[in-house]
Image (tube, helix red, strand yellow):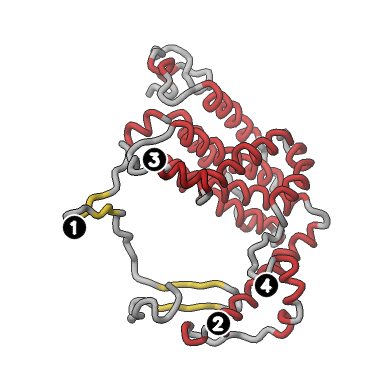
Amino acid sequence: MFLKGCRPLDHARQLRISSQRASVTVLDETVIAPPIHRVLDNGGAMPVPRPDAARLEHRYRPQLEICDRLLGELWTHRPRPRDTNRDEYLALLLAILDRTLTTFDGVLALCRAGRPQQALMLDRSLFEDMVAAFWLSAHEPRSEALQLIRDQADHNVLLTNDVIRKYPHRFLIEADNHPDLKNRQAEFKKKFGAYGTQSWFGDLHSALQEIKPLWEELGGEAETLDVHYAAVHWQLNLNVHLTVRGIARAFEHYGQSDTVDDNEMDVALRAGFFSVQGLGHLVYRAFGLPRDRLWEIEQVRHHVFSELKPNDPARADLGPYDPCWCGSGKKLKFCHGK
């Protein structure tokens, strides 16, 4: 996409690469991605089958609604940039929160489309972002953590310019010279790897050990964090990525794109909720916001995910004046029975 020779560049499509900021920006007309198609033997094509959206919404309604409630709470009451008072740490927290909320919105959209396995791929990113935010908050001194972020940004600048120098005929600009950064390249490689693949907060397991005291200070249980990492995040890596287990799972479900696995849907929603709620508590505390609404949502979440199953028959047997299944204490008629 960003290389000359891959496709013709016309007036409507321009490419600009800022090596100074190690970023790539493509200016383009509005592009509408074509639907995914499966090619037939006769040369025709058909859309990949999808589960019935209305049926999915009904089947997983309690789980989806509590996730929507969390997303709405954090989006509505999120701090604004002016609230940071130009504090670099608070600004970074807001950046992570914004990325997390849009990613979680994507998780819910994929679940509603009957694509929980793809949602799980985003859940992995949500968990790592949550851990990164906690590590940034817990690491002492914090100035050292902030410097690591700056150093990795500088390392990316050097890596970008190295690529431009290696393939000058492929880029539209010349590489920049940064002798001050070049002198630190060996140091950067040791910290972040020769190709910049190591995170500024180190490996995930070590970061988890460092954030546990802060996690407990905010009301969480260290064991819950460990269990999520071992039983959810680690399992996601085995099942979602192209491991032997992932390949076996894909072969087992080959051609069944219109079916949904209840367990995958449950894990996708639980995992996303876990990471987003944890980050929400951290951000609210950092900005001095009350966390009572987050605790209320947590109480409902526990009921919804622990006691209600998809399409639970108990929900169908409720009368309009029975207590609502969501645990609000209201009558069904005046709550989710509207």
Query: In the image, is 176 to the left or to the right of 38?
Result: right
Contact (CB < 8 A) between labels 4 and 1? no
Q: Which residue is mark 4?
A: 155
Vertical side of 270 occupied by 102: above or below: below
Decide if residue 105 is in sight here: no
- Provide the secondary structure element on which disc 1 rests: loop
Q: Is residue 219 above or below residue 141?
A: above
Residue found farthest to the left: 42
Q: CA distance from mark 3 to mark 2?
A: 42 Å
User: For the residue marked with disc 1, what is the amino acid?
Assistant: Gly
Residue indicated by mark 3: 253
Callout 3, which amino acid? His
| Amino acid of disc 4 | His
Q: Is residue 306 above or below residue 31?
A: above
Q: Is residue 8 left or right of residue 138?
A: left
- For the residue labelled by badge 2, is the local secondary structure a helix, a strand or a loop? helix
Residue that appears at 59% across and 76% down:
160
User: Which residue corresponds to the image point at 38% horizontal and 33% vertical from the top-left?
Assistant: 57
Q: Where on the picture, by quarter, is residue 143?
A: bottom right
Q: Residues within 10 Å of mark 4 (few under 14, many from 20)?
A: many
Sequence-first disc among 3 and 4: 4
**Nearest to N terminus: mark 4 or mark 1:** 1
Circle nearer the N terminus (2, 1)? 1
Residue tagged by mark 2? 164
Tag 2: amino acid: Ile
